[in-house]
Every structure is written in C-alpha cells, then in structure tokens.
Amino acid sequence: MSQASKLRTALREPGMVIAPGAYDGLTAMLVAQAGFPAVYMTGAGTSVAHGYPDFGLLTATEMVANAARMARAVDIPVIADADTGYGNELNVVRTVRDYEQAGVAGIHIEDQASPKRCGHLDDKEIVPREDWIAKIRAAAATKKDPDFLIIARTDSRAVIGFEEAIGRANEALANGADMAFVEAPQTMEEVAAVPKLVKGPCLLNVVWGGKTPVFDLREAAAIGFKLAIVPALLLKAAIGACDDALTALKETHTHPAPRGGMTVRDAFNRVGAREWDVFRTRFRDGASWKAAE
C-alpha cells in the first residue's frame, strides 16, 4: 500500500486525522514515534530551518528535497506544503511529479501571488480565481497515483472575504481537488461554517497566535473537519528549548542536563541506531547474511 493509500484509508475512518508539523527527518521521526497517523511538512518550518522567514524564498527543488528526506525517515504518510506550485500550470505539473516521486502522500497548492507569505500574516495578495483553478486542474491531471491527495488552499478570506473563500474552495473541488483548505477563518463561527458550506473534505490549520481561534481538536472533528495540521508545534518548541539550553550554558558555563537525562546513545536510538548497528556484523558471517524469510 502506498503512503497516499494509507492516508486515504485513514481519512475514510470516522473522526479526523491530526498531522503535526515537522521540518526535517528528525522531527518527522518524533511525530511518528508519538503515534500520529500522518506528518505535515510545514513550509514555514522548512523555510526557517533553511535560515529564511516564510516569505516564499525557497525553491521547489529545496522543498521537494526536504519532503523526500522526511518521507524516507518515516513509515507514515507525509503531507507537504507546495506553496503556490512555484509558477503557472507548467510548473505545477513538475511540482506534482516531483513531490509524488519523493514519496509524499499529498500536497496543498494555494492561490497567493508569488512570492507568498505565511497565511497568518497580514498583507497577503492572491491571484485571480481562474488562474488558481487552472493550477488545480493541472495538479489533478498530473498525479499518477489516484490516491495522491491534492489539497486546494485558498488565502482569499483575508483579501476578499469569507464568501469568496468558500466559493473558491467549492470550485477547486469541482475541478479535481480532493480536499479544501480555507486558510485563516477568523472566528469560531467561520470555522464552524467551513465544513458546512464546503462540498467536500476540509482541512483545518492550527496556528497558535494566528488568525484562527485555537480550540479542542475533538470539537473540530465533531463539526466535520477531516484533517488538521499543526505546522509550528515542533518548530516553536525547538526554538524555545534551544534558547533555554543556550541561556543555561552562557550563565553557568556548564553543559545543562538534557531533558530526561538523555544520553548520546539515547539520542541516536531515536533515529534508528539499534537497527543500523545490526549491519556492522551481519555480513561478516556467511551463514547469516541473508534477510530473514
């Protein structure tokens, strides 16, 4: 079963899939080890991990390469940010091909003008509806695996209004998108209205301190959302933890104790050291080098 098929199967189950955001192989592994059914490659986190703000400064090649590393690191579906598709319909065709070959289960493509910016910042710009719908059609026509998820993200709520966002979401679904992503509804009333007004599965973006109220995700499932992404959860946690460790080192001139007393071996084991250690000796013994049947 492909990762895209795994994701589709999970989405068909009752309730909602929660995909915490990760930005590299390590954080993707941590999401999988925590028992979540899917992981989201955050574009903001990927940008920050490369040393840039989320202003559309990374190329498609850099984004796909990061998605590929994450997909190799885990055995759960990876859903990836594909920004604006990195150009017009021609670029979207390549974008879908590259992400699918990288092993991800799905992507979202938005209607912001390029260069885009974080969906929870002000002063966004969007492209005409017909231009974005053409990209969605191109994405839907390009995918090889029918289960590969094309998520249509519209940022039009902040620019034109909620009614336009719903209209764009529904038109995208009618033109090949598999799921709608109405970015940054601004009140609980708007949040609740999205799955009622959109004629298909809906994604909720959970950003602490952003435009959308943060609330219990069990309630989000109850009102009809099928997928929730939590992009900045680990990114902000990592920045805070790093700040604390660096402050402690600067103030005490002593290596601060890691949380839980984590040793070097403990850290390596979180990324598969035990499994890799087997290969050190396995091929030295001619009687036991074959894989177990």
Image: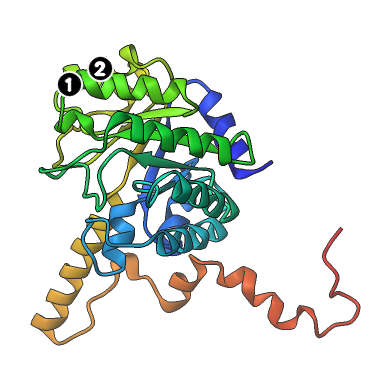
Answer whether labels 2 and 1 touch (C-beta < 8 Å).
Answer: yes
Please state, as top left, top right, bottom left or bottom right, where the C terminus lies in the image.
bottom right
> For this view, does 218 lie left or right of residue 9?
left
Q: Amino acid at mark 1?
A: Met
Q: Nearer the viewer, residue 174 or 18?
A: 174
Residue tagged 2: 192
| Real-space Cα separation, disc 2 to disc 1, in angstroms | 6 Å
The part of the image, by quadrant, that contains residue 112 is top left
Residue 152 lies, with reference to residue 102, above or below; the image says above
Query: Which circle marks residue 253 in the picture?
Result: none
Image label count: 2
Position of residue 132 measured from the top left corner of the image (x, y, whole percent): 35, 35
Q: Position of residue 266 (x, y in %)?
A: 45, 71
Q: Is residue 163 left or right of residue 8?
A: left
> What kind of element bears circle 2?
helix
Dot 2, how many residues are within 10 Å of its Cα: few (below 14), some (14-19), or many (20+)?
A: some
> Within 10 angstroms of label 1, few (less than 14), some, or many (20 or more) residues?
few
Residue 7 drawn at (x, y percent): 55, 36
Q: Is residue 231 left or right of residue 265?
A: left
In this orientation, does residue 168 appear? Answer: yes
Residue at 38% from the left image edge and 52% from the top image edge? 86
Asked if residue 79 can be seen in this view, the reply is no
Foreground residue, 183 or 91? 91
Q: Residue at x 35, y 51 (%)?
A: 42
Q: Is residue 164 left or right of residue 83?
A: left
Camera-side residue: 64 or 136?
Answer: 136
Q: Residue furthest top?
A: 196
Circle 2: residue type: Ala
* Image vertical order of residue 287 relative to residue 176, above or below: below
Badge 1 marks a residue whose secondary structure is: helix
Residue 188, disc:
1
Q: Quadrant of the N terminus?
A: top right
